[in-house]
Image (tube, rainbow, N blue to C red):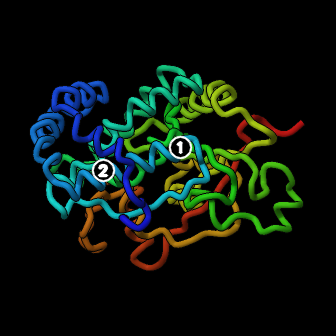
C-alpha cells in the first residue's frame, strides 16, 4: 500500500491530529453510521491518533482521494481489508470516509448532484458496514477499498443502482474482456476504447424489481444528463455474476435477477467468477462449498453448479441515453 500511495500531504496529517472526537461523532451521525459503531469509533479515535503508522496510512489515503477526485482515469488499487491489524485497521475506512466527506460534499455541490442522490451515495459506508457485521459480527467496512472511488466522486447511487463514470478501457473497473478492435470499429461510437461510459454496480440488499429498475434508469438519465453530460453515444455496462446466462433456465422468467439480466445485450466471452458468486450470495467466508446450506433456489443452483464446474461472470451493455438516431 505504501508504494502505491506515496507520501501523505502534511495538511492531511495536521487535519487528522486536529480532528476532535466531538466533530467525528457529529459527522458519523450525519452519515447514518449505526449507533454501536459510532460509539466504538469515537471511543477509539484518541487511541488511533496516538498510532503514527495508522495516522500516516489514513493521511496517505486521504491525500490520494482528494488529489484524484474528478479524475476517473486515476489508478484504483484493490487490496484486502486490514481487520487482522486490530481495531485501528478494522475502523480505518470509517475514519477515511468521515474526513473526506466535507470535500466530497463540495464536489457534489459543484456538479449539481441532487440532495437525494447525495444521501443515497453516502449510504455506501453503512451498507458496506452492514455486510461486515453480517460476515464477521464486528464493526468495520467490508471491501474498504471500494470507498476510494466513491470518495473520489466517480460513483453515484441513483435509485437501486450505482452508476460509475469511466471511459471504456480505462482503469481496473472497466468491463474486460471487451469487444476486440475490429468489432469496436464495426459497432462505432460508444463501443470504442476511450468512449465515455457508465458502469453499473448492484448494491447489496436492494430492490431490483422491474418497476424499481425502470424508475432507477429514468431518474439516472435525468440526473446524469446534468452531472455527467454525454459527449456521444453512451453505453451502460455491467459485469456481474448475475449475468450468467444459465440463470434464466434455473430461476424461471419471474425471477428479478433474470429480468435484470435481460436488460442487457451480453458479450460472448466470460470468465470464471467462483470467488465473487460465493462471496455475494452466501456471505460465509471460509466455509467450504460442501458445508454451505442453501436457503434459496438461487443458492442451491450455485452450489450445484460450482460442485461440478465454473461460474460464468458475463458482461452486458445497454444504451443509456437512448438508442442512436
Nearer-the-camera pick, 273 or 112: 112
* Extreme residue in the bottom direction: 308
The first of marks 2 and 1 along the sequence is: 2
Residue 152 percent across, percent down from the top left: 49, 42
> Is residue 258 shown left or right of residue 77?
right
Residue 36 lies, with reference to residue 260, above or below; the image says above
Nearer-the-camera pick, 287 or 161: 161
Picture quadrant of residue 145: bottom left
Picture quadrant of residue 23: top left
Residue 265 percent across, percent down from the top left: 71, 53
Q: CA distance from mark 2 to mark 1?
A: 46 Å
Residue 131's disc is none
Number of residues whose C-alpha sits closer than 10 Å to that of mark 1, classed few (under 14), some (14–19) or many (20 or more): few
The residue pinned by badge 1 equals 254
The residue pinned by badge 2 equals 58
Residue 7 lies, with reference to residue 24, above or below; the image says below
Residue 295 percent across, percent down from the top left: 30, 55
> Is residue 17 shown left or right of residue 177?
left
Q: Quadrant of the C terminus?
A: top right
- Could you tell me which residue is drawn at 38 percent across and 33 percent down? 101
> Is residue 95 shown left or right of residue 274?
left
Nearer-the-camera pick, 206 or 187: 187
Amino acid at each position: 500500500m505504501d508504494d502505491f500511495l506515496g507520501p501523505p500531504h502534511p495538511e492531511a496529517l495536521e487535519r487528522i491530529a486536529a480532528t476532535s472526537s466531538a466533530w467525528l461523532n457529529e459527522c458519523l451521525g450525519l452519515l447514518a453510521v449505526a449507533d454501536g459503531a459510532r460509539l466504538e469509533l469515537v471511543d477509539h479515535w484518541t487511541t488511533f491518533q496516538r498510532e503514527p503508522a495508522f495516522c500516516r496510512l489514513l493521511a496517505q489515503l486521504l491525500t490520494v482521494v482528494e488529489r484524484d477526485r474528478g479524475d476517473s482515469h486515476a489508478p484504483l488499487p484493490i487490496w484486502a481489508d486490514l481487520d487482522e491489524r486490530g481495531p485501528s485497521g478494522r475502523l480505518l475506512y470509517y475514519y477515511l470516509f468521515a474526513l473526506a466527506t466535507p470535500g466530497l460534499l463540495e464536489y457534489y455541490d459543484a456538479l449539481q448532484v441532487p440532495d437525494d442522490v447525495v444521501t443515497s451515495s453516502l449510504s455506501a459506508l453503512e451498507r458496506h458496514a452492514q455486510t461486515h457485521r453480517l460476515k464477521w459480527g464486528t464493526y468495520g467496512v467490508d471491501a474498504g477499498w471500494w470507498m476510494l472511488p466513491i470518495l473520489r466522486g466517480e460513483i453515484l447511487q441513483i435509485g437501486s443502482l450505482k452508476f460509475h463514470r469511466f471511459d471504456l478501457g480505462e482503469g481496473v473497473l472497466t468491463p474486460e474482456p471487451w469487444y476486440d478492435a475490429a468489432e469496436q470499429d464495426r459497432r462505432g461510437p460508444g463501443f470504442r476504447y476511450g468512449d465515455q461510459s457508465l458502469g453499473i454496480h448492484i448494491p447489496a440488499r436492494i430492490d431490483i424489481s422491474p418497476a424499481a429498475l425502470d424508475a432507477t434508469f429514468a431518474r439516472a438519465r435525468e440526473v446524469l444528463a446534468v452531472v455527467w453530460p454525454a459527449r456521444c453515444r453512451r453505453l451502460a455496462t455491467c459485469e456481474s455474476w448475475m449475468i450468467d446466462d444459465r440463470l434464466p433456465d434455473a430461476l424461471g422468467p419471474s425471477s428479478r435477477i433474470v429480468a435484470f439480466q435481460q436488460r442487457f445485450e451480453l458479450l460472448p466471452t466470460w470468465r470464471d467468477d467462483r470467488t465473487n458468486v460465493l462471496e455475494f450470495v452466501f456471505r460465509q467466508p471460509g466455509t467450504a462449498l460442501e458445508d454451505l446450506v442453501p436457503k434459496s433456489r438461487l443458492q442451491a443452483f450455485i452450489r450445484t453448479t460450482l460442485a461440478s464446474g465454473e461460474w460464468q461472470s458475463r458482461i452486458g451493455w445497454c444504451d443509456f441515453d437512448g438508442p442512436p438516431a
